[in-house]
Image: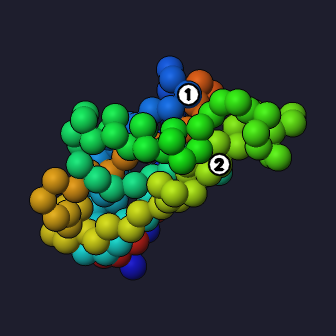
């Protein structure tokens, strides 16, 4: 069995941002030479997510609006977690959007359904954070 481990780094301009990382993940699979296996992609921070959905701007605005309704950033004083930090909402948003995805690798490609794309979801950005990509197979 072959395996490869890589990290993708991000430093988003905004506090909340979604980044399509499908091309980066496929590039790592290409480099690994793995044709049949599994690909794990997970955020390495507890205020960021990795999720799969459509790369459609309206939907992304809907996600942001919905998450802000569920866990508004302000007032920051409404959260017990906020004392030294102001990112309680980011922890909650990450929990809903998920930590990781696992995608089958078939014939050397991400074996997606129609419209599926992988996103990095940032909820407490403007600093360097990373995602782990691990591919196993042969
Ligand atoms: Zn925190």
Res 129 seen here = no
Give the mark nearest the N terminus, 1 or 2.
Answer: 1
Image point (76%, 43%), residue name: 79
Q: Residue sitting at 64 percent across and 42 percent down?
A: 89
Q: Residue at x 26, y 69 (%)?
A: 105
The structure's colour scheme is: rainbow
Residue 8 versus residue 125: which sits nearer the camera?
Answer: 125
Instruction: Check disc 2 and report the residue beneath it.
Output: 91
The count of marks equals 2
Give the residue at mark 1. Answer: 15
- Quadrant of the image for the N terminus? bottom left
Q: Hey, which residue is sitting farthest top in the picture?
A: 13
In the image, taking residue 79 as reference, residue 97 lies left or right, namely left
User: Does the residue tagged 2 have its C-beta within 8 Å of any atom of ligand 1?
Assistant: yes
Q: Residue 24: image x %, image y %?
A: 33, 43
Q: Secondary structure at mark 1?
A: loop
Residue 34 lies left or right of residue 121; in this view the side is: left
């Amino acid at each position: 069995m072959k395996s490869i481990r890589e990290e993708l780094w991000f430093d988003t301009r905004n506090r909340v941002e979604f980044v399509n990382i499908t091309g980066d993940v496929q590039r790592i699979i290409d480099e690994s030479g793995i044709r049949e296996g599994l690909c794990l992609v997970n955020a390495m921070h507890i205020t960021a997510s990795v999720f799969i959905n459509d790369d459609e701007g309206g939907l992304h605005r809907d996600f942001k609006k919905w998450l802000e309704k569920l866990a508004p950033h302000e007032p920051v004083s409404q959260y017990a977690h906020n004392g030294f930090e102001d990112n309680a909402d980011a922890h909650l948003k990450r929990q809903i959007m998920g930590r990781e995805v696992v995608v089958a690798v078939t014939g050397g490609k991400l074996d997606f359904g129609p419209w599926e794309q992988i996103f990095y979801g940032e909820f407490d950005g403007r600093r360097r954070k990373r995602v782990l990509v691990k591919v196993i197979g042969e």
